[in-house]
Amino acid sequence: MNGRCRWLSVMAVLVCACVLRAGAQTTAAAPGRAAFTVLFYNVENLFDCTHDSLKQDQEYVEGGKRRWSSRRYFAKLERIAKVVWAAGNCQPPDLVGLCEVENHRCMEDLTRRSILKEAGYRYLMTESPDQRGIDVALLYRPSSFRCLGSEALRIPPSAPGYRPTRDILHVWGKVLTGDTLDVFVCHFPSRLGGAVRSLPFRQWVAHRLRRAADSVASVRRVPQLLVMGDMNDGPSSRVLKVLTDGPGPDGLIDLMVGQPKGTYRYRGKWETIDHLLVNRRLTGRRASLRLDPDSVRALDFPFLLVEDDTYGGERPCRTYQGWRYEGGFSDHLPVRAVFDLILKQTDNHDSE
């Protein structure tokens, strides 16, 4: 364990207590109401130790440049699991979106061979043409989200030089109110080659996502949309404006606008590049799935941060800092929101 990443041993004790507590009680809520927690987390290169001949994953294999190993792999799984438990205040979040996950083995190990086994998660993930082999996934708890279906939205080439990127994962299911919630999990192209040069590629993906969200809104009787992902751009960027430039109750709003804490630190400056978006309907007082605006935040738990020796202040405690193994969590902070479910007397309502 890297000594610079604080509170890991303390966190292990807290998480174990949370697991025991979660097994004995449900989330406290007023009568006729229930909390519904969603989390998104870029977990920074969650690779297993086996080389996939079709992917560029050689850095993360036994004997590779990063000296990746089974021990380090399972330690990373446990740390991701601890973050998930902590995000739910000793209750596992109902939905957890992840990006930078290599394959199904990683998801099986995370949900079956870490402390998340106690949460009973199921998962869905994409199998994208990304050259490095990283994908997006969604964990869900069948007790609070009954999955009805899913699809992977492929991103077609947009221009010369466009590298294959991650699919968008679209999942729809019913929450405890009986309403249908449509969830999109995404990881937009990086800024490799420069932010300006790569901007059109992210805009292209944003337009694909916007068309998909608009299509869903046009066929649902009461559309309820949630988008989560690493967009590699801030709330005021042209990329996010593609998603949020729409009127009416089914237009999307970015919940990270105005948040005091960023999610990623680059050269000493915090940036908000991980986002949660919902359609305006979910912020209204009459919604049965109603956002609690005070719950929206980037989770800057002390154990996720370490002193930044180069630029001062604090930065995320990473798995690798450059090529040096730091033994931390991720180079991103997770983002969370909680919804208040207004439960109905009957459970046969259908919002299709």
Image (cartoon, rainbow, N blue to C red):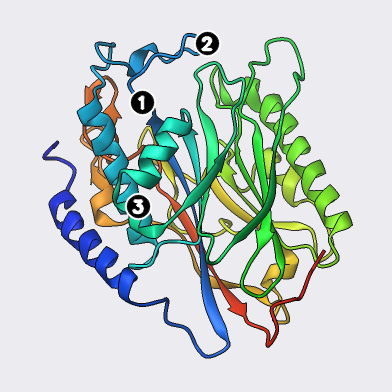
Amino acid type indicated by mark 2: Leu
Question: Depth-wise, is mark 3 or mark 2 nearer the camera?
Answer: 3
220, above or below 197, in the image: below
Above or below, 197 against 288 in this view is above
**Left or right, residue 248 beside residue 296:** right
Of labels 3 and 2, earlier in sequence is 2
* SS for dot 2: loop
Q: Which residue is mark 1?
A: 48
In the rendered image, residue 122, in percent from the top left (x then y), is placed at: 50, 50
**Label pair 3/2, CB-CB below 8 angstroms:** no
The dot on residue 73 is none
Quarter of the image with the N terminus in it: top left
**Tag 2 residue:** 54
Q: Secondary structure at mark 3?
A: helix
- Mark number, residue 117: 3
Q: Earlier in the sequence, mark 2 or mark 1?
A: 1
Can the viewer see residue 311? no
Q: Quadrant of residue 277?
A: bottom right
